[in-house]
């Protein structure tokens, strides 16, 4: 099983937790944000030394609140690749509609080649209006009918952009004419003629993987059809199993190939390991509560189970106890966490696991301790 580490990459906070301050009441200066970026690199180097398979950041912009302060995981990854030997490097996720698809393809190919084939292309549609609409994307929600047209445009833009990215990375020459993109635009003069096709340089010298977040029913239908890997996070364990199996069925229907039980699917779980359950809960609670204070209003908890056994209503701010019950947070001793991971592995046939050990506000010294304990005390127990 391949095991990776995922960090949001935020600043250290001495007031993380439920209650005040409100996220938008915080404002960190440029020096503090850059210090966090340097520490994120340090953790990546340590994860390589500890033998983790992959290291993931996320793409977000303009977050003066200090939650996610590395806006370009590809550029960051190129530096990390120079400092490491084996670890694969990806973003959960590159927000595709916020890029021109050809710039994303060029930058990814550059990282992939410079790293000797260690780049991973993680892609998503986006969630944050502040950054998406500033950078030329539409943001909607499957769960919000008032934004149905924005959601349609976002999905159309993402789909066309992904078609262009794959064509440009895999074909010697290409062109594309769609609703959103015309590549190349018609009528460009060039040396006595007109540009009808393009060639992307560089293109990958090594095989590469594409992974997409699977967060809504339409996306669950879309991702296996395209042949990408699916990433599952923040869902009740029974919903994970249901969607995991549905993904495999849809992949077989579209491609005529039966996947192995864990193939083409990746589970993300938040983790905290301490000497006792009580210490683990006390350690993780401030960061857990800060996580949901930050992301609950965006509807990230809709994968939790509600009182009726169906999905929770959007806007739920779960307690740590509810997250442990849903098994989105695995908390306790090394033996406790290993037992829960082995249950997931047995239930899902899991081949790809990513751990989230750095809660919003955590000190990076704590994160380094967590990834070390997990590597030395938890992972050896996974069957």
Image (cartoon, rainbow, N blue to C red):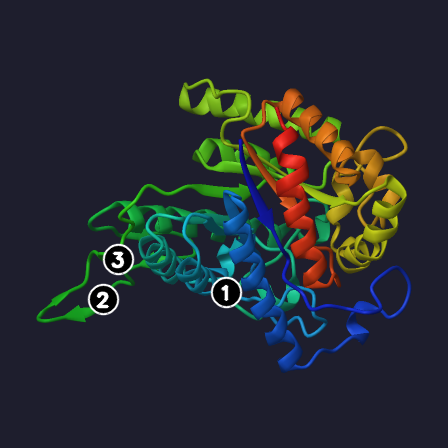
Q: Tell me the residue that label 1 is attached to.
A: 72
Question: With 68 as the anchor, is 103 left or right in this view?
Answer: left
Question: With 104 as the anchor, is 221 left or right in this view?
Answer: right
Q: CA distance from mark 3 to mark 1?
A: 19 Å
Question: With 332 as the anchor, is 168 left or right in this view?
Answer: left
Task: Check contact, mark 3 vs mark 1: CB within 8 A.
Answer: no
Q: Residue at x 71, y 78 (%)?
A: 28
Q: Residue at x 52, y 24 (%)?
A: 250
Q: Residue at x 26, y 57 (%)?
A: 202
- Mark 2 falls on what kind of element? loop
Q: CA distance from mark 2 to mark 1?
A: 33 Å
Q: Tell me the residue that label 2 is attached to.
A: 187
- Mark 1 falls on what kind of element? loop
Which numbered tag is attached to residue 202? Answer: 3
**In the rendered structure, which disc, 2 or 1, sits on the residue that comes first in sequence?**
1
Label 3 Cα crowd, 10 Å radius (few <14 / some 14-19 / many 20+): some
Residue 234 picture location, percent across and down? 71, 41
């Amino acid at each position: 099983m391949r095991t990776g580490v995922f960090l949001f990459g935020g600043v250290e906070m001495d007031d993380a937790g439920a209650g005040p301050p409100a996220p938008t009441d915080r404002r960190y200066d440029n020096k503090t944000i850059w210090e966090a970026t340097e520490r994120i690199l340090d953790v990546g180097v340590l994860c390589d030394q500890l033998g983790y398979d992959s290291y993931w950041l996320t793409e977000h912009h303009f977050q003066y609140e200090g939650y996610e302060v590395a806006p370009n995981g590809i550029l960051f990854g190129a530096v990390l690749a120079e400092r490491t030997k084996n670890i694969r490097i990806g973003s959960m996720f590159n927000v595709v509609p916020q890029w021109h698809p050809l710039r994303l393809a060029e930058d990814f190919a550059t990282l992939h080649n410079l790293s000797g084939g260690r780049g991973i292309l993680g892609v998503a549609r986006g969630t944050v209006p502040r950054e998406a609409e500033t950078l030329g994307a539409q943001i909607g929600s499957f769960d919000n009918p008032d934004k149905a047209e924005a959601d349609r445009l976002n999905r159309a833009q993402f789909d066309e952009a992904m078609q262009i990215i794959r064509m440009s990375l895999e074909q010697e020459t290409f062109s594309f004419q769609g609703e959103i993109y015309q590549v190349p635009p018609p009528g460009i003069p060039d040396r006595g003629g007109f540009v009808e096709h393009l060639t992307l340089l560089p293109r990958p010298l090594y095989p590469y993987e594409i992974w997409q977040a699977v967060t809504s029913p339409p996306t669950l239908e879309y991702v296996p059809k395209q042949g990408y890997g699916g990433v599952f996070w923040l869902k009740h364990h029974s919903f994970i199993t249901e969607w995991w199996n549905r993904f495999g069925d849809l992949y077989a229907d579209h491609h005529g190939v039966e996947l192995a039980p864990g193939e083409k699917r990746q589970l993300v779980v938040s983790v905290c390991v301490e000497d006792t359950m009580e210490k683990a809960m006390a350690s993780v609670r401030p960061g857990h509560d800060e996580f949901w204070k930050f992301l609950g209003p965006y509807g990230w908890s809709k994968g939790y189970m509600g009182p009726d056994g169906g999905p929770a209503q959007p806007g739920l701010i779960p307690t740590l106890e509810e997250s442990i019950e849903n098994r989105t947070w695995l908390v306790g001793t090394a033996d406790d966490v290993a037992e829960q991971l082995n249950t997931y592995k047995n239930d899902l046939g899991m081949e790809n696991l990513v751990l989230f050990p750095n809660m919003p506000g955590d000190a990076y010294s704590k994160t380094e301790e967590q990834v070390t304990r997990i590597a030395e005390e938890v992972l050896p127990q996974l069957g």
